[in-house]
Image: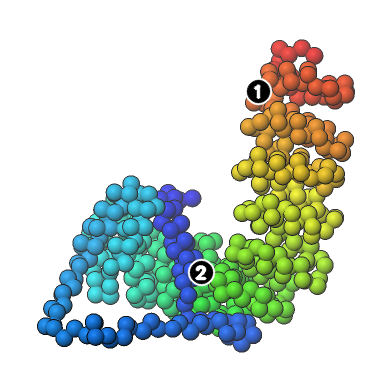
Amino acid sequence: MHKLRAHFLLVFAWSVTLLAAYFWGAQRDGGMDKDLVADVKEVTASIPSDPISPEKNNTGSPVDLDVVETVSAGRILANAREKIRSGLFSQKGILRAFNCIQQLDADNVRDAVLELELMDVSDPDHKVLLLAVMGRWAELDGDSAMSYAEGKLSGDLRAAVIENVVGSWSEENPEAALAWYQRRYVTGQLVSWLGNSASGLLTPIYLGMTHSDPEAAFSSMIAIKDEQGFRYAVDGMAMAIIGLKKSEQFLRRIGNLSSLRQEIVHARVLKYWVRLDPEEAAAWVLRMKSSGLRAKLIRQVGLEWATNAPESALQWLLNNAPDEGKADILREAIARWAQSTPNRAATWLRRLTPGPDTDQAIAALAQQIVHRDPEGALSWASTIKSRIMREQTISSVFAQWAIRHPREAAQRLEKTNFPKDQVSKLRLLVAPNLPEVSP
């Protein structure tokens, strides 16, 4: 990662969060036309003003209205810098700075850019403020903001600003952003500026397009020739569709796509669908007619679900995962769970009836906890029913234990009741790390 990209990490994280919150949380006009999404557009009732009552019918002298003071671009930038510094470049400080930048309007946003041109580019505030100001400019006039980024900036700074401008521009005018993308992509300029990440611009563009004109977005998406570009476009459209709660209608539209593209759409839509409503996504998968595809998607949904609600996800997997791959799926789910909360994963595993399906899950748990609790890992490994898997897991646990704490591992080995041939093999794992241990 370039140094500049690393410096922008907080800003990028904020930008992604803002974009998701804007389209997922806010209710904008839009919806899927035809059978893609029907009747999504909600009619928002206007709030009537309070009826005039005798108590409120004040006919006194008119009140002088305060004149709103126009805030200069220089003052807005100064306030934003103060927020950044007072927040010590924390996410909260940067959020406050971005809120200040939102005060810029069509009349003074260019003045803010000119102010930044006079600023020392080595100043750490410069990069954060430039991204914020260019994002705001793109909201007001995307064409002009992009023209400036292309003509005045270069290198990593230009790449970062272009990404930010496209994100903001796509909220206001995604069709114009897409037209710009297509022109620059055909000429090869985008790849020269952004490298392999150029196609990633399609995600915010199609996120915006789906909210403004979902039918046009769908038609445009399926016409994309480039497979990488198609993936990124699907990503943006999937996020919007999930927010509109029209995932199932969208998935019914993809029957004419190639099997590879259908696989891509299923994977991306379910990724976001599970995050928003895992039970609904899981129910849809179980209704699929194709057993092969259903089994594959059960795995995906279960593992995605296990990230946020492992107990619910694992119970669902136990009930619905195909027998052929159930043990492998449980192993992977437990491994992920044990990375963050191993005690809860262990407690859940204790409730299961030992058997082939649970052996791999126990092995995964032992592998995950050996670094923090080698004694516990060994105890868990010893409960595996399959002799071959039990010996393999015990050997793996002892090997990792011996690397970090060879003496403790050697002492523990002498207290085991393992078969003699197994103990002899385990001593060989300990010996290279503790030469003085006698056989």
* Residue 159 x %, y %: 43, 62
Q: Which residue is found at the position 30% from the left and 64% from the top?
A: 101
Left or right: 242 as drawn, with respect to 21: right
Read off the residue under disc 1.
405
Left or right: where does residue 41 sit relative to residue 247?
left
Q: Position of residue 300 (x, y in %)?
A: 70, 59
Residue underneath mark 2: 24
How packed mark 1 is, by other alpha carbons closer than 10 Å (few <14, some 14-19, many 20 or more), is some
Residue at figure coordinates x 66%, y 46% from the top left: 337
Q: Nearer the viewer, residue 186 or 301?
A: 301
* Marked residue nearer the N-terminal end (1 or 2): 2
Q: Is residue 243 left or right of residue 110?
A: right
Q: Residue at x 59, y 77 (%)?
A: 221
Asked whether the beta carbons under mark 1 and mark 2 sit within 8 Å of each other, the answer is no
- Give the percent coordinates (x, y) of residue 352: 79, 45
Task: Give the CA separation, mark 1 to mark 2.
Answer: 49 Å
Is residue 248 something that shows in the picture?
A: yes
Q: Amino acid at mark 1?
A: His
Which of the two residues, 96 or 61, is positioned nearer the viewer here? 61
Disc 1 is placed on an element classified as loop
Residue drawn at (13%, 83%) of the image = 60
Seen as rendered, the residue at the extreme front is 54
Q: Quadrant of residue 50?
A: bottom left
Q: Which quadrant would the C terminus be assigned to in this image?
A: top right
Q: Does residue 4 appear anywhere in the picture?
A: no
**Location of residue 271 (image quadrant):** bottom right
Examine the rendered structure and indicate whether residue 209 appears above or below residue 116: below
Mark nearer the viewer, 1 or 2:
2
Q: Where residue 115 is drawn, which disc sits there?
A: none
Element under disc 2? helix
Residue 162: where, in percent of width, then height? 42, 66
In this view, which residue lies farthest toward the left? 61
